[in-house]
Amino acid sequence: MARFSHAVGNETYRFDSLKDVMAKASPARSGDYLAEVAASSDGERVAAQMALADIPLKHFLDEALIPYEQDEVTRLIIDTHDAAAFAPVSHLTVGGFRDWLLSDYANETSLRALAPGLTPEMAAAVSKIMRVQDLVLVAQKIRVVTQFRGTLGLQGRLSTRLQPNHPTDEPAGIAASILDGLLYGNGDAMIGINPATDSIASICAMLEMLDAIIQRYEIPTQACVLTHVTTSIAAIERGVPLDLVFQSIAGTEAANASFGISLKLLQEGYEAGLSLKRGTLGNNLMYFETGQGSALSANAHHGVDQQTCEARAYAVARHFKPFLVNTVVGFIGPEYLYNGKQIIRAGLEDHFCGKLLGVPMGCDICYTNHAEADQDDMDMLLTLLGVAGINFIMGIPGSDDIMLNYQTTSFHDALYARQTLGLRPAPEFEAWLQRMGIFTQADGRVRFGEQLPPAFRQALAQLS
Amino acid sequence: MLAKLLICSGKRFRQQAGSYEEQHVPLAAKDVIMDNDIKGSTDNPWQELRRLTPARIALGRAGTSLPTSAQLDFQYAHAQARDAVHLPFDHAGLSAQLAERGRPSLLLHSAAADRHSYLQRPDLGRKLSPESAQTLRDYAQANPGGVDLAIVIADGLSALAVHRHSLPFLKRLEEQATADNWSLSPVVLVEQGRVAVADEVGQLLNAKMVVILIGERPGLSSPDSLGLYFTYAPKVGLTDAYRNCISNVRLEGLSYGMAAHRLLYLMREACRRQLSGVNLKDEAEVHSLEEEHAQDMRHNFLLDAPKV
């Protein structure tokens, strides 16, 4: 029994449910084909987009894509929905909402006020009928500012996570990549290590090392070792200095269960982090990573398309007032996002949906060697996200992650975005770079200092 | 003609570099700029850090971008990784080499028809094609009684890894397996295969254990990394939680001897405890590594330096 139908030309297209319309309206990507939820033709896809455009936003409050009784993420979305915030757009259809977002009614103030009134499904729905330029233009209007030891997300700023990974967690190797990154002006979002060894002892040792480096050189940034939230809680209980609490999250209860987490456990991690009171400017301290396809790969997608599942992860994220949320867009592989075109579109959708929902979005602009993508594709996504006002990107030596075996944005790539788009680091970090004599930035142009900073010259002298 | 072209392009490069610098220097220095000694790229004075990590650090910069040589080095590494992903599986070559050693082999195909569908449909790579499944059933019927260890070689995401490392590694493994008096299956070669296809092979051959040698997803600096996955009591539908993995077998990574040693240890433990996977980790070894790191992390050049 078709619940939605749309007639166009001589054809009438029928769709079983809101979930079905949403999936078939999604721009083509391999993961939705793998899940067998995608439109079967280009015509059906656009007809689904037309049908979706006619659906009132209010309908999303009546028809849950994943049943309320079965899924705690749905319960979180419905139970925390702010009807008053929703009021200004509650009369609109999805298509009308797109027009409203592009109009002058939507500005920094009105969009900030609207965020708690939107569900992730509404954000996902409107993104499906937006072109790349719409995703960029609307996202650019939104500011989501967060603070810990630095301030992220301000207008005209772009931050980087310095990711000094090493295949065997060698301290000197990690330190070498950290110094290289700092000397290229990277690391204001955080210095964040993906550990090769996931044991509590080595995690604690890495956290102490990062804390000592940050203190020693008085770097206005925050540290993170990307380990399971339960390991972070254990480290906090041992009295180890921990700034940001990391966790991978997804948009369904079952997918989160496959990560070994629940909303309750995330709350415990958040409270453990808060108990340390380590933020000097603010208390945003959760760091979440997400990515389209994660629910499907855990076979926990409930027949919902992967982009909508991803947007639901942002509802999980925003509940814990995160410092940063990172969509690791091209990491998951070509069975979910096949090529550069799909990765680019997904990165922009994620950034748009996250920002619309009030989440401080960054993006790991990345690809694996079995995806049909290359550095040119990453340059396009980086440029587009830079224009769209993304909060942060990754910074890694020469784009090559030698531990995780994938390619992401390099220290140099961040400088490219600074030069071409005039984007500056977080203000506290910018001042540190200037004080250290690493670089200054005026009228967009980056000017490096003539000499190595004395403190780092001392460190390098240890090696000779 | 070739030499002339090279000289021309070299000269053009220097001129470009010179004109770039021109924007950044005071006018008084203009005469110097036109000199062909000027180069547009800047080396980093922290080159010695490179011996501490294989990461691409201290690359220098042209303006703020990658210098030409670093840029092309990266492109070549990516090209090698891409070529490894798309290199066809030379099963005939492997089969011939195995025959020389007196080892029989069977050639099978997964349900993924080609590389394109292999990359987009992991589910197809995890199961045998109907014809291949029948081949194995026929073999098992003709050779009843099962085996202790079924050995599978699949191209995975890098046929290059398999071509380079599977046979030398297998030689080490089989020497030790024979010493343990384990009966072995023919070497089952699976084209367009993923890890879980080994469980179907093991089940159809009625094997007590199965090990698959498979090409791992190529990294930029490791296009030829071989992975080993081991399952006790294999059957269709098992998840990763039931497997043990030994990764990064290649010349610059884990040696054949060490990999065979670890795998044999796991297999002997698996036989003793009748299980594999997360409940069968090589705990003693992991533990000693951890302790070493726990002590070392706070001593590195950034933290040992005297304060300025």
Image (cartoon, coloured by chain):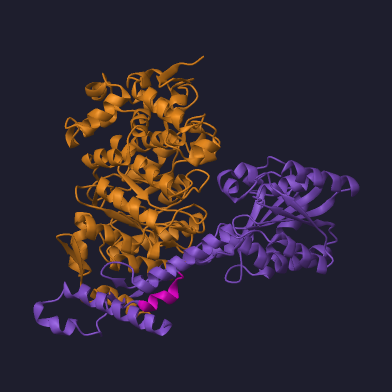
Taking the spot 27% from the left edge, 44% from the top edge, the residue there is A283
Taking the spot 56% from the left edge, 36% from the top edge, the residue there is A299
Q: In the rendered view, tell whether residue B227 sits above or below residue B61.
A: above
Quadrant position of residue B151: bottom right
* Residue closest to the eye, A141 or A451: A141
Residue A105 lies in magenta, yes or no?
no
In this rendering, position of residue B121 left or right of residue B269: left
Taking the spot 29% from the left edge, 77% from the top edge, the residue there is B12
In this rendering, position of residue A308 left or right of residue B155: left
**Residue B256 location (% of width, % of height):** 67, 69
Q: Main secondary structure of the magenta part?
A: helix
* Residue closest to the eye, A30 or A403: A30
Taking the spot 71% from the left edge, 69% from the top edge, the residue there is B168
| Residue B95 visible in the displayed image | yes
* Residue closest to the eye, B199 or A47: A47
Quadrant position of residue A5: top left
Numbered range of the magenta stretch:
B47-54
In this rendering, position of residue A308 left or right of residue A276: right
Residue B53 lies in magenta, yes or no?
yes
**Residue A395 location (% of width, % of height):** 35, 59
| Residue B234 visible in the displayed image | no
Q: In the image as oriented, which residue stretches furthest toward the left?
A: B28
Count of numbered marks: 0
Chain that is coloured purple in the picture: B
**Residue B275 location (% of width, % of height):** 72, 48
* Residue closest to the eye, B91 or A276: B91
**Residue A259 location (% of width, % of height):** 51, 41
Chain that is coloured orange in the picture: A
